[in-house]
Amino acid sequence: MPLVEAVRMALTTLWTQKLKSFFSLLGVLIGVTFLIAVVSIVQGMNVYMEDEFANRLVGLNTFQVRRMPNFNMGNITDEMWREWLRRPRINYGDASFIQAKLETPAVFSRSCDDRTQIVANGKSARDIRVEVVDPGYFTIKNYDFSAGRPFTPQEARAGLPVAVIGADVEEKMFPGIDPIGKSIAIGGLPYRVIGVVAKQGTLFGLSLDAFIVAPFDSPLKRIACRLGYMDEFHVQAPTVAQMNEAVAQTEGLMRIRRQLRPAQDNNFAIQTAEGALSGWKKISAVLFAALPGLVAISLVVGGIVIMNIMLMAVSERTREIGIRKALGAKRRDILAQFVIESATISTVGAAIGIVLGILLAFIVKATTPLPAAVAPWSIGVGVFLGIFVGMVAGVYPASRASKLDPITALRAE
Amino acid sequence: MTDVVIQIVDLTREYLMGAERVQALRGVSLEIRRNEYVAIMGPSGSGKSTMMNLLGCLDTPSTGEYWLNGQEVSRMPDDALARVRNKEIGFVFQTFNLLPRASALQNVELPLVYAGVSARERRDRSRHALERVGLGNRMDHRPNELSGGQRQRVAIARALVNEPSILLADEPTGNLDSATSADVMRVFDLLHRQGQTIVVVTHEGDIAAHAERVVTLRDGRIASDARQEKIQAA
């Protein structure tokens, strides 16, 4: 019997028994929905973590030299923590040593940060993140300015009290007025606002816009930095390859400067975006490893349901089988009919599952910041699984149907 | 010999009913020629149904030979029998045995599907077969939208669509009232006049009266085999 004929017959049967069919394909439907949705959400999270999290917080092709890592998703033991606290801080000498010796082209910026109170325009706000940096910082962070400008190398060298503020600070301190040129007291020190960074939004629900940036040598340094030391030294390379090269060189340079023997571990941290992602990568690897198991469970359940439905169909349609055999259907015609019918049910389930999975991915994309994107391969896998599960589930019922004796089958009610 | 469609030689069929051995047929020999109209009669338990199943290639004999249209079918395996049923035999059953969810046309197409005929040719031949039994205007109706007589005519169209060597009818009017029965028997008479070989298994005398030859079975043997003057349905 031609395939098209069998599929059409199966679809007709499905359509005439809508409710029963729906329940029978529920298992496969859920399995495939789950597959498509989880793959697209996890991949969306990967993109989110890489683009939003790592590149925004660390910067594109950027790494930081620090006393200890600042993003860590693994377990930190007491022993690790104590070792970190025993490490020497990064000092100005370290920074200029790296800047002088690094062979790859790079942009540099020292940085210290603290949280302090600000007062301006008759209002005050507590616990605002203030950071003193070198001019290269603006290149590294790639900030868009909604008003004003970054500070110049001259202003930086002179240590002038000028400040660039985040969009949240502008909203809070200067509602409805132009903040450029206004004065602002940062930790009691008088500053002048020269630029506003365009709104960046939130990351994991935390605002990225509640900050103030000032020149490294401006008066705030006395609050933010310990004398002679810094919190982070940022290095940005033009490309990923050059960044990796720079990371390796920097590690070597720091070890030379710290006079570490080969057997000694680094007593500093080099934080890359990739390093910040390592924890997430572990989580997503676990999700991807668990996914086949979870999908397999629902597909096995779905397959068993379909097998039962097909067994029921065979016994309900014993007479039909008898008629078909009397009219000349061979064993393999009957076998093919029921296997194809079973595969069709299952594939329809998979198709609905794919649609629901895509829909779910879109809902996640629309309602959360995750750029959930449906992976084309997951659709292919979904279709294949649909057909495969249906065929496997259909073989036993179909073989029972094909072995029915036509005389007995014709007598069935 | 060329004219012989069915040749049965000393056919027996035993069944095991639990531990008991039941002899449904105890040595039947019969020859049916092309364009004969034969009624097989007999009380219940006479072996009528067994005879019908064997003639229809739904079952194989315990011993003996069955030649259908020059092929020995008594020793054929399952799939070969299926092919013979498809090509050589047109069934008409007491309970019509139409597929309930398929239209009249789709029901008639069914044997052609298994014969591997192309969709277009299937459609044309099925239409033609339905027109032959006077149902040209009911092709898209499902069985439950048709009267009993119409259903049986769909079944006859289905039986004829593959141009079988024999039309094998099992109590074709058993589920019909007398007016519709007469109607269906008129179709059989017409087909017989057009040259169709017909075998009707029945226990009703007035159905058998349409045939030109009546074979009566009793206790698994042929009790009588008589030619009769065919009566014309009124």
Image (tube, coloured by chain):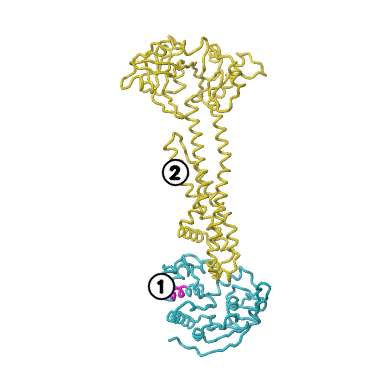
Chain colours: A yellow, B cyan
Looking at the image, residue A265 lies above or below residue A26: above
The chain to which mark 2 is attached is: A
Q: Residues within 10 Å of mark 1 (few under 14, many from 20)?
A: some
Query: Which region is colored magenta?
Result: B148-154
Quadrant of the rendered image containing residue A207: top left
Residue A81 sits in quarter:
top right
Q: Which residue is mark 2?
A: A359
Describe the element under mark 1 as helix, strand or loop. loop
- How crowded pointer 2 is (Cα within 10 Å; few <14, some 14-19, many 20+) is rated as some
Image x and y of residue A263, in percent: 67, 19
Q: Is residue A296 above or below residue B31?
A: above
**Nearest to the observer: residue A133 or residue B128:** A133
Residue found 53% across the figure and 90% down from its top: B228
Amino acid type for the residue under numbered disc 2: Leu
What subunit carries mark 1?
A: B
| Residue that badge 1 annotates | B136
Q: Is residue B109 magenta?
A: no
Q: Secondary structure at mark 2?
A: helix
* Residue A407 image position (x, y, % from top left): 58, 71
Residue A300 drawn at (x, y percent): 57, 49
Furthest residue in direction front, as rendered? B19
- Badge 1 amino acid: Gly
Nearer to the camera, A77 or B224:
A77
